[in-house]
Image (spheres, rainbow, N blue to C red):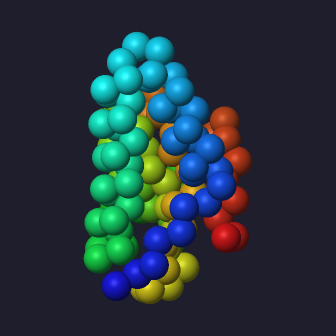
Amino acid sequence: MASVNWTFQALSDMADIAEYHDQKSEKYSKFLTSRFFERGEQLEKFPFMGRVLPESNLKSVREIIVENYRVIYSVPSSDKVNILAIRHSSIPLANFTIDIDV
């Protein structure tokens, strides 16, 4: 079983997403936040379940989709997962810098 590390960037992204959705629906905001954490728990058992991040083409950098969001993570070893960032799928990833050296 892999240990999952939520980076500061990923937690900050999640807080921003929750704050945005709180303005429209607090219920949906809570649902979405819980889905992010549920997917993180799934990564403990299945660290390679997501697809390779197309923009990186590195087998260790992957993504899973939660609603309209891309949860980007790295798998530096089979027993460790670093959740790096959460980005809306409509925004090109090229506009962001993601530090994979966690």
Q: Residue at x 48, y 32 (%)?
A: 18
In the rendered view, tell whether residue 99 sits above or below residue 47.
above
Residue 15 appears left or right of 79: right
Whether residue 84 appears in this view of the structure is yes
Whether residue 65 appears in this view of the structure is no
Residue 26 appears left or right of 90: left
Residue 44: x percent and y percent? Answer: 35, 74
Direction top: furthest residue: 24
Residue 65 appears left or right of 95: left
Number of dots carrying numbers? 0
Residue 41: x percent and y percent? Answer: 33, 65
In the rendered view, tell whether residue 95 sits above or below residue 62.
above
Residue 79 location, quadrant:
bottom left
In the rendered view, tell whether residue 5 sits above or below residue 87.
below
Q: Residue at x 31, y 46 (%)?
A: 35
Residue 39: x percent and y percent? Answer: 32, 57
Residue 31: x percent and y percent? Answer: 30, 36
The N terminus - image quarter: bottom left
Asked whether 101 or 33 is in front, the reply is 33
Q: Residue at x 38, y 30 (%)?
A: 29
In the rendered view, tell whether residue 97 sits above or below residue 53.
above
The C terminus - image quarter: bottom right
